[in-house]
Image (cartoon, rainbow, N blue to C red):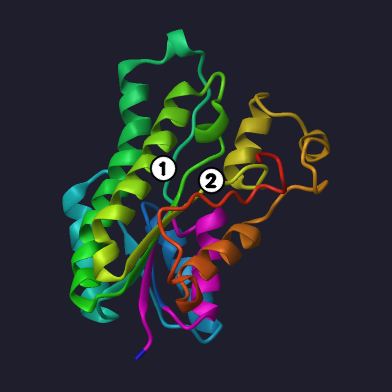
Amino acid sequence: MSRVAVVTGGASGMGESTCHELGRRGFKVGVVDMNEDAAQRVTDDLRAAGCTAMAIGADVTDSRAVDQGFAKVRGELGPVSALVTSAGVFEYSPFLDISDDAWARIIDVNLTGTFYSCRAALPDMIDAKWGRIVMISSSSAQRGSPFAAHYAASKGAVITLTKSLAREYAEYGITVNNIPPSGIETPMQHQSQAAGYLPPNEQIAGNIPLGRLGTGADIAAAVGFLCSEEAAFITGQVLGVNGGAVM
């Protein structure tokens, strides 16, 4: 019986690539996204490729919706063995212009949504004495991010959450790791470029030692490895997938 993976934010960008990578590796995949139509599109693509998958429309900031979504996955696909928390939002703003609502929204999606998702998945992993959690953070958490302090703070907290859960649940055979991407071409990056906050791709690539932007597939490959049996002795780690931009 194949294992079950849940990917939050699975309907686009790095999350979508991760769904396909885990499906290719034999996982049954629960595609969780607040855009249920997009989650269904990814699910249809996975099924067309011969994978078992289902779509869950859920806002990760709603604890009841998260719990209900995981219950649906559990009922249709089986207990959750792997979780990838890719759901996230980004916003540029000068620090003194960050409103209470903007701060709360970034924290709610990026940090609290990750908390709700981990809390929903862990009981299955504890029962099975096996589990894989990979949290997606950001290089902003490692080096800071001017005009996005709230985003960087939320992702820094996700890194410390990773390390805390890794220590707490190691005795159950559960590994918890973190990937902070940088220089990855995503819809979120395109939005930032359109708003004038990021330079063109060629200029970004010029600051990356490997000389190119990364892709969702680059992140997904690392996630796939961390969710594998071969990664059983890796936990509490921050694995930068960034072409050498952060060392």
Q: Nearer the viewer, residue 56 or 109?
A: 109
Q: Mark 1 touching mark 2, by CB under 8 A?
A: yes
Tell me the quarter of the picture where residue 159 sits: top left
Q: What are the residue bounds of the magenta stretch? A: 2-27
Looking at marks 1 and 2 on the same chain, the residue that comes earlier in the sequence is marked by: 1
Tell me if 49 is positioned left or right of 67 in this view. Answer: right
Disc 1 to disc 2, how far (Cα)? 9 Å
Name the residue rendered at 43%, 72% in the picture. 232
Magenta region includes residue 12: yes
Where residue 146 appears, x then y in whole percent? 56, 19
Name the residue rendered at 81%, 33% in the picture. 203
**Is residue 72 shown to the viewer in this render?**
no
Dot label at residue 34: none
**Is residue 29 shown to the viewer in this render?**
yes
The quadrant in which the C terminus is found is top right
Q: Nearer the viewer, residue 139 or 57?
A: 139
Dot label at residue 159: 1
Name the residue rendered at 79%, 41% in the picture. 205
Tag 1's secondary structure? helix
Which residue type carries mark 1?
Ile
Tag 2's secondary structure? loop
Where residue 8 appears, x then y in whole percent? 39, 57
Where residue 1 appears, x then y in whole percent? 34, 91
Q: Which residue is mark 2?
A: 180
Q: Nearer the viewer, residue 14 or 33?
A: 14
